[in-house]
Image (tube, rainbow, N blue to C red):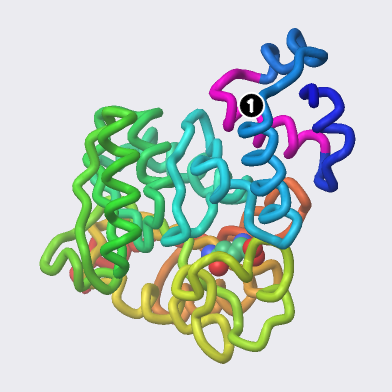
Amino acid sequence: MTPRKLIQQVGIERSEAELLLAHLLEVDRGWLIAHADEPLDDHRVGMFLTQAEVRAKGEPLAYLLGYRDFWTLRLAVSRDVLIPRRETEHLVEWALECIDAGAQTALDLGTGSGAVALACKAERPAIRMTGVDLSQQALLCAKENSRSLALEVDWRHGNWFQAVPETRWDLVVSNPPYIAANDVHLTQGDLPAEPDTALVAGNTGLEAIEQIIEQAPQALNAAAWLLIEHGYDQAEAVTELLRSTGFQHVHTRQDLSHQARITGGQWLNSLTGN
Ligand code: GLN
C-alpha cells in the first residue's frame, strides 16, 4: 500500500489523513507527496489504519497528533487540556495591546496547555507572565510546553486568583470554562473528548466568569485590564457583570466568524483609592 492509496481510501478527511500519516512516519507533508507511490511496510499501514479508525470514531486529531498549532507556537496537548482554539488568538492580540500600553505583569487564569500565556511571552519577552490552573495535569502540560519552547512563565496551581494570593496584576486574561452543563454543543466535534473542567462552568455557563470578575478587583493594579473569552451569546451578561463590579471602558470584540467572543474592562477605581 502506498501513501497515495492509503490517504485516498481511508475514511477520514484528506488533510487529516495526511497529517496523521506524516506524523506516524515522522516526515513532513512534502515527503508524503514526493514518496506518494512508494509502498509502505504493513506494520506502518496497520498503525495508520488503527489511528484513522480512532479518529473516525471522534477522537480529536490534536490528541492523536499530540500537538496543536496556536499563534506561532506548536503546543503539546493531552487529554488533560482544552485544545487551543483559533478564536482564542484574539485574546492574545488584545493582551499584546495591553502589554504595549504598559502592562508589565500578566496573569492567565485557567491556562490549560499554557497557550495564551506562552503566546504572550513569545511575542513580548519582557512581560512577567504567570499561568494558573486548577488541574495539576494541565499544569504539567503547560510546563512541558514552557520548557520545550524555552519561554519562562511562572506556573501556579489553584483556583483562579486564590492560586496567587496578595498579588496585583497589570493585566489578567482568561479563557475559562463557559459552556452550560446542558448545552448540546458538548456532544459535538472535539468537545466530548475534552476535559469537562475546561469546558463546563455550571448550569448557566457563566459561573466561572462570575467568580473571576468578583475576585478581580482585589487583584488588579490601577488601570489594569481584565479580558475574558466567552460564549457567542454571553457578551451582554459579561458586560453587565464587569460594569456592575466597577470596570470601565467595557467593550466586546468579535472573532473571525463575527461572534462576540471577548469582553474586557479596565479597573480604574484604585486610582481614586477604592
Ligand atoms: N470555545 C470553546 C467551544 O465552544 C469552548 C472553550 C471554553 O469553554 N473556554 O468549543
**Going 73% across and 80% down the picture, which residue do you hit?**
184
Q: Is 272 left, or right, of 83 in this rendering?
A: left
**Going 75% across and 8% down the picture, which residue do you hit?**
34
Residue type of the residue flagged with mark 1: Ala
Secondary structure mostly seen in magenta is: helix
Above or below, comparing residue 35 to residue 95 in the picture:
above
Looking at the picture, tell me which residue is in the foreground, 212 or 225.
212
**Going 73% across and 39% down the picture, which residue do you hit?**
16
- The quadrant of the rendered image in which ligand 1 is seen is bottom right
Looking at the picture, tell me which residue is in the foreground, 268 or 260.
260
- The residue under label 1 is 22
Indicate whether residue 138 is drawn in magenta: no
Q: Position of residue 89 (x, y in %)?
A: 56, 43
- Quarter of the figure that contains the N terminus: top right
Q: Which residues are magenta?
A: 14-28
- What count of labels does the image hold? 1
